[in-house]
Amino acid sequence: MTRAQRITNIVAVLLPFVAFAIAVVVFWNEAIAWTDIAIMGVLYVIAALGITIGYHRMLTHRSFQTSRTLSYVFAVMGSTGVQGPVINWVADHRKHHAHTDEEGDPHSPHTGPATDGVLGPLKGLYHAHIGWLFSEQGRANRRKYAPDLMEDPGMRWISRNFHWIALGSIVLPGVLGFVFTGTLHGALTAFLWGGLVRVFFLHHVTWSINSICHFVGSRRFATEDHSTNVMPLALLSMGEAFHHNHHAFPRSAQAGLRPVEKLMDPSMWVINTLERFGLVWNVVRITPERQAEKQAQARSTPEAKVTQAA
């Protein structure tokens, strides 16, 4: 990672945090305007679905097929989440699946520097949540892990122009705030909440999948990693917090597999809707029989029984 990339990541991590702290201190006794809530909520959902459906399920795992135009739309939506260029993101995540919770995993809480000893778990969680951004992000070989995207001129253009798309997504809320309120104060608060604070929340929800969802939670399938399901994070993460399900069946378009989980997987709601309109097809779903088979494997493995009971 170059010095410029490291500095960019530091700014991307710290600036939204500082903005969140300012928002809490400055507006402690002041109600947030409905325009700020609406702008922040809509842009959060757009960016989150861009990451979960676009970057992750569509481009990383090819869980469904769609037109080139719609794939570009999702890639741009994901770029507004300010989590890095689409090709870098996909390459890093495919590398994560190739080496899950082993040496070579970019962001496992169970590997990396100094994860042994009394403070080892905390250091591991820090590395998985934020630390990897300063040492591992964007280092996966794109030609090895994302050759399909490297051969796509449109994806290369979106990836190359990520910084402009991300910057635009942060400035846009201020513009919308001014349009809706007609005041500079409205523009400033919308920029703060809909731009920077939105990014702060989305960053930490996404990073929690790397850290918390490989550390605590429930498991029921036979997998060789430490992935877990953490239901309280499900809706905020658009279903991605059913992370153990995902590692058990990486190509599945749906992360929520049980009936109650399906109700908390908004990404799959959108995929199902797009499928009904013929905008996506060849959607990968896991049959109940296949799920039962993998769950039976977990019951027959002593180590899996321990992790299920944890």
Image (cartoon, rainbow, N blue to C red):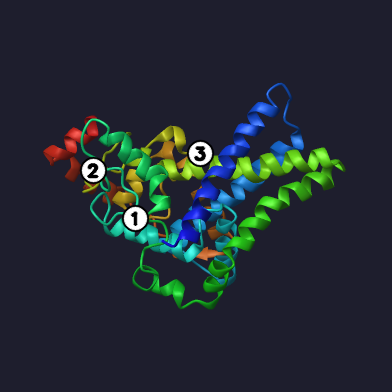
- Checking the image for residue 299, the label placed there is none
Label 1 residue SS: loop
What residue would you read off at disc 2?
A: 295
Measured in 3D between alpha carbons, the distance from the residue under mark 2 to the one under mark 1, in whole angstroms, is: 15 Å
What residue type is disc 3 on?
Answer: Leu
Please tell me which residue is depicted at 56% across the width and 74% down the height of the picture: 154
What residue type is disc 2 on?
Answer: Gln
Residue extending furthest right?
A: 182
Name above or below for residue 9 compared with residue 41. below
Measured in 3D between alpha carbons, the distance from the residue under mark 2 to the one under mark 3, in whole angstroms, is: 24 Å
What residue would you read off at disc 1?
A: 250
Residue contact at pointers 1 and 3, CB within 8 angstroms:
no
Name the one closer to the observer, 63 or 190.
Answer: 190
Name the one closer to the observer, 265 or 243.
Answer: 243
Mark 2 and mark 1 lie on one chain; the one further toward the N terminus is 1
Work out which quarter of the rendered image holds the C terminus and state it.
top left
Q: Position of residue 130 (x, y in %)?
A: 42, 44
Label 2 residue SS: helix
What residue would you read off at disc 3?
A: 235
Question: Can you tell which quarter of the image residue 125 is in?
Answer: top left
Mark 2 and mark 3 lie on one chain; the one further toward the N terminus is 3
Horizontal side of 61 relative to 108 (left or right) equals right
Please tell me which residue is depicted at 32% across the width and 44% down the height of the picture: 244
Q: Position of residue 262 (x, y in %)?
A: 45, 42
Name above or below for residue 149 compared with residue 169. below
Name the one closer to the observer, 20 or 179.
Answer: 20
